[in-house]
Amino acid sequence: MFDLTGKRALVTGASGGIGGAIAKALHDAGATVALSGTREEPLKALAGELGERAHVVPCNLSDPEAVDALPKAAADAMGGLDILVNNAGITRDQIFMRMSDEDWQSVIDVNLTATMRLCRAVMRPMMKARWGRIVNISSIVGATGNAGQVNYAASKAGMVGMTKSIAAEVATRGITANCVAPGFIATAMTDKLTDDQKQKIDAQIPAGRMGTPEEIAAAVLYLSSPEAAYVTGATLHVNGGMAML
Amino acid sequence: MSDVADRVKKIVVEHLGVEEDKVTESASFIDDLGADSLDTVELVMAFEEEFGIEIPDDAAETIQTFGDAVKFISEAS
């Protein structure tokens, strides 16, 4: 099950906790991976840890030219591209009344527009190959909303609608497009929370704990696999029951 | 028939799975040959590859029939 031998995957935001776990899971399943992110050092460290079949393709997703160049750089490094995981994302949290146009635009640009551009760029090789997997990492807040995250929630909800539309267009060509929507996941970001804050979060989650990056990676692995060929336009919620959608 | 027309016809027949005699000068890919909008994009991709040319999106939109394709490619290549 879930054998990705011979498949080539580009993972954005691979320097982060979730992205790194996704890259590792795909790599463990046999895929060749291209690790993208803005910070080259952690990408190199991860590539070193993975060993063979791992390439580093740095990219600043807020730079449109860099975004356009990324799929080609990844395909050149790997000899093709079969799986695209749009995991990179940023937050610029602020209560709505104080949210600047810049806070809005930068989050939409990186989370939604860069994702769209990468999806568009991989269409051609995937159409020709009659096989492709797109997995976009959305968020629970794209479905539920969250105070202070008007821009982020909009970008993540936009991603869902976009993914469904792509899925409808290319379903006949053996290409699937799905979202994974994580809830609270324990990463370097949540490590900074106080114990009191963590307890409050855990209390909102029926599972009573935060998720792990590996639990998100497992969902991505499934949606990237040949076994998930009949799953498209779906959003797989991985949130410990925090929102049952 | 010109060499370009033969090569274009071969691509159309293979891609759309239609009879060769249906692919006439005025045959519309969508109305007569059963292509959907995605097929037309793929045909353009196949033409680009076969003839080593680039067909911009606005030009691709004007290629509606087999004749349009042959004309465009003959002029471009």
Image: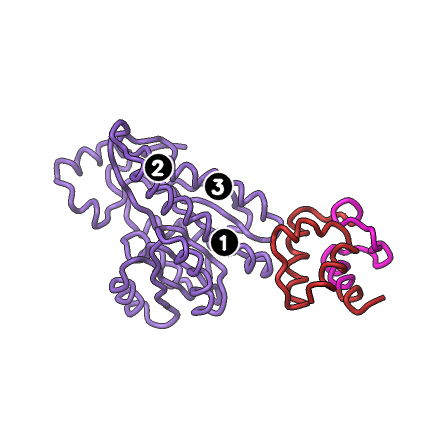
Corner quadrant of residue A241: top left
Q: Residue at x 71, y 62 (%)?
A: B73
Q: Chain of mark 2?
A: A
Does residue B15 show up magenta in the picture? yes
Closest to the camera, between mark 1 and mark 3, is: 3
Within 10 Å of the Cα at label 1, are there few (<14), some (14-19), or many (20+) other Cα atoms?
Answer: many
Q: Which mark is residue A162?
A: 3
Q: Are marks 1 and 3 in contact (CB under 8 Å)?
A: no
Q: Which mark is residue A140?
A: 2
Instruction: Identify the chain of the residue marked 1, using the numbered disc in the image.
Output: A
Q: Secondary structure at mark 2?
A: helix
Drawing shade for chain A: purple
**Residue B17 x/y as whole percent:** 76, 56
| Quadrant (top left, top right, bottom left, bottom right) of the C terminus of chain A | top left
Closer to us: A2 or A10: A10
| CA distance separating discs 1 and 3 | 15 Å
Q: Which residues are magenta?
A: B8-32
Give me the chain that's red.
Answer: B
Q: Position of residue B4 (x, y in %)?
A: 77, 66
Image coords of residue A82 (percent x, y): 50, 60
Above or below for A244 versus A31: above
Q: What's under tag 2, amino acid-wise? A: Ile
Horizontal arrangement in the rendering, residue B57 relative to residue A20 (left or right): right
Expressed as whole percent of the image width and height from the top left, the position of residue B24 reads: 84, 55
Residue behind mark 1? A133
Q: Amino acid at mark 1?
A: Arg
Asked if labels 1 and 2 share a chain, the reply is yes
Decide if residue A31 is in sight here.
no
At numbered mark 1, what does the secondary structure look like: helix, strand or loop?
strand
